Image (cartoon, rainbow, N blue to C red):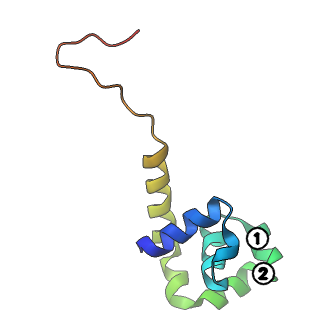
Amino acid sequence: MQTILSKIRDAANGNLGTLSTGEALIAALVLNRTDWITEMGYTVAQALERIGPNWSARLPEISQEYGQQEASINADPKPFRETGEQAWN
């Protein structure tokens, strides 16, 4: 799953052109970018058919994992403090 998640991150960062059609459609579906699907000449139903039943069935799992990874990456880091040190004000 890490491979497709990496490709979804690539697409989210504007590197959609480096993906296969199937990868681009999966990325568009996970990222909820129906405009990309339309630009590729597909409807959502056609995109789901194109990626096939196995990938379609995994979209919720992939989307959840992508969201968790993005939340983790974008989380505010906690400032480092030594034991007993006061928090910064």
Which quarter of the rendered picture does the N terminus lie within?
A: bottom left
Q: Quadrant of residue 48?
A: bottom right
Residue at 52% from the left image edge and 65% from the top image edge:
63
Observer-nearest residue: 73 or 28?
A: 73
Q: Residues within 10 Å of mark 1 (few under 14, many from 20)?
A: some
Which quadrant of the figure has residue 8? bottom right
Q: Nearer the viewer, mark 2 or mark 1?
A: 1
Q: Residue at x 82, y 83 (%)?
A: 41
Is 11 placed above or below 21 here? above
Quadrant housing residue 83:
top left
Q: Amino acid at mark 2?
A: Thr
**Label 1: which residue?**
36
The residue furthest left is 83
Secondary structure type for disc 1? helix
Percent x, y for residue 17?
A: 70, 74
> Which residue is drawn at the image coordinates 58% and 91% (left, top)?
52
Viewed as shown, does residue 14 lie left or right of 67? Answer: right
Specify the quadrant that holds the C terminus. top left
Numbered tag placed on residue 43 in the rendering: 2
* Residue 16 point in image, percent of width and height: 68, 70
Depth order, front residue of 24/57:
24
